[in-house]
Image (tube, rainbow, N blue to C red):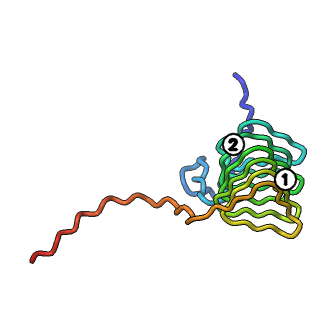
Amino acid sequence: MARSPFPPAPTAPPGAAQPPGRPGQAPAPRKDTSDRRTLVVGRGISVQGSIQDAERLVVEGTVESTMITAHELQVAHGGMFRGEIEVEDADLAGTIDGTLTVRGSLTIRSSGRLLGKAKCRRLQVEDGGQVSGHLEMITGAAPAPAAPVAAPAAPEEAPAD
């Protein structure tokens, strides 16, 4: 029988308080912004190819990729992104060379460089930040967040005369 490549799950020391729920079962995951699926490409690391299902992408090294859709992009100082990406918000302290679409807010830090083509709804460029290429502002109303679908209301009756 082969051993699992993963170490066993840590157990609480004897006498420690058990989390709510069934004994031996991990607590239910919390749903907040820190639970986003995050991919961090560290300094000195290069990634080429397709990236899927990452809600938050942090680039400290180099990423070369075709179309990526994520909620948040952060390119750290010294980081490089080459390719095409569409995000809700982006924070750029490194370099993007390619096509960037930001449905929300794009912040270019003092060390940030944007090369190529970009679209954004809101733009903030710190003193020293660079934009070189084509920049287009997205106009019109921001898309409303999806609301839960309610059951249709009963039709109102016309008042009797």
Residue 111 in view of the camera: yes
Q: What x and y, as percent, mark residue 73?
A: 73, 54
Residue 13 in view of the camera: no
Q: Outermost residue toward the bottom?
A: 161
Identified by mark 1, the residue type is Thr
Label 1, label 2: how far apart the Cα atoms are: 17 Å
Closest to the observer: 115 or 146? Answer: 115
| Figure quadrant of the N terminus | top right
Say whether marks 1 and 2 touch (CB < 8 Å).
no
Instruction: Identify the residue shown where x is 72% and y is 52%.
Output: 100
Q: Is residue 134 left or right of residue 159?
A: right
How many marks the image carries: the answer is 2
Q: The residue tagged with tag 1: helix, strand or loop?
A: strand
Between discs 1 and 2, the one toward the N terminus: 2
Instruction: Identify the residue shown where x is 80% and y is 45%.
Output: 82
Identified by mark 2, the residue type is Met
Q: Outermost residue toward the top?
A: 1
- Which disc is residue 86 wearing? none
Residue 66's image quarter? Answer: top right
Q: Residues within 10 Å of mark 1 (few under 14, many from 20)?
A: many
Q: What x and y, as percent, mark residue 15?
A: 67, 56
Q: The residue tagged with tag 2: helix, strand or loop?
A: strand
Give the labeled residue for mark 1. 95
Instruction: Identify the residue shown where x is 65% and y is 47%.
Output: 69
Give the labeled residue for mark 2. 67
Closest to the observer: 13 or 10? Answer: 10
Q: What x and y, as percent, mark residue 139?
A: 61, 64
Please say if 82 is above or below 144: above
Q: Residues within 10 Å of mark 2 (few under 14, many from 20)?
A: some
